[in-house]
Amino acid sequence: MKKGLSLSIAVCSIILLTILFLTAPVLSASNPQDDSKPIASIGPYNFSGTIEELKWHSMQRVILHKGGSIRPAHFIVKLVKFKGVSAEDAVAMTNFIRSGEYGKEPLQGMPPYIIVKITSAKNDYLKEGMKIKVTGYQLDRFRLNLAEKHKKLEIVK
């Protein structure tokens, strides 16, 4: 009796898995993700500060099962002595780029730095020690990419 029951459960499991496997593409096609709309956004912000560290990343093409994405060349910049954003916004901007950079504990006062992404095809556009002023800075997170845009970036003398 137990052998017959085990066989029935196994057959039902196989049938159920087959149905799920065959209908999964239909279910996902009926609710496609729109990659043209951001999942989350922050900004716009206006701020200035001094570049302490930076790393340039060349353009990348990411190829996935259902297409691809272009990630433009950009800098990841550690900005110190910054002004123009609140402590909460500074933490939000940094954590948007580097998830969990400041952890979950609330900071006392202003954070020591912010991390920003600056899109640039030129790897020598920004240098350590430069003072910059950014207007209209916004970050948009898409399913496959993190996009940065700003109205104006000035190098302050």
Image (tube, helix red, strand yellow):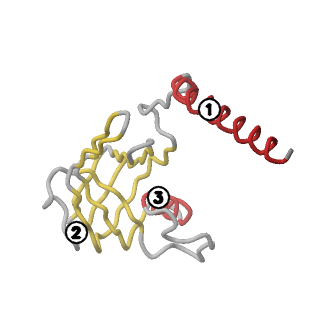
Q: Is residue 74 left or right of residue 112?
A: left
Q: Nearer the viewer, mark 2 or mark 3?
A: 3
In the picture, the disc for residue 20 is 1
Which image quarter holds the C terminus?
Answer: bottom left
Sequence-first disc among 2 and 3: 3
Q: Which residue is rendered at x = 41% and y = 47% of the image?
A: 138
Marks 2 and 1: which is nearer the front? 1
Check disc 1: other Cα within 10 Å, few if <14, some if 14-19, many if 20+. few
The residue type indicated by label 2 comes to Met
Q: Which residue is mark 2?
A: 130
Q: Which mark is residue 149?
A: none
65 over 79 or under it: above or below: above
Left or right, 76 with respect to 126, comes to right
Picture quarter containing residue 6?
top right
Q: CA distance from mark 2 to mark 1?
A: 57 Å
**Which residue occupies the foreground of this view, 125 or 9?**
9
User: Label 3's element?
Assistant: helix
Dot placed on the residue nearer the N-terminal end, 3 or 1: 1
Residue drawn 26% across and 68% down?
Answer: 54
Secondary structure at numbered mark 1:
helix
Location of mark 3 (residue): 93
Instruction: Report the Cα–Cα distance between label 3 and label 1.
Output: 41 Å
Looking at numbered disc 3 in the image, what kind of residue is underneath it? Met
Q: Secondary structure at mark 2?
A: loop
Question: Crowding near pointer 3: few (<14 within 10 Å), some, many (20+)?
Answer: many
Quadrant the N terminus occupies? top right
Counting from the top left corner in percent of width and height, residue 14 is at 65, 37
What kind of residue is marked 1?
A: Leu
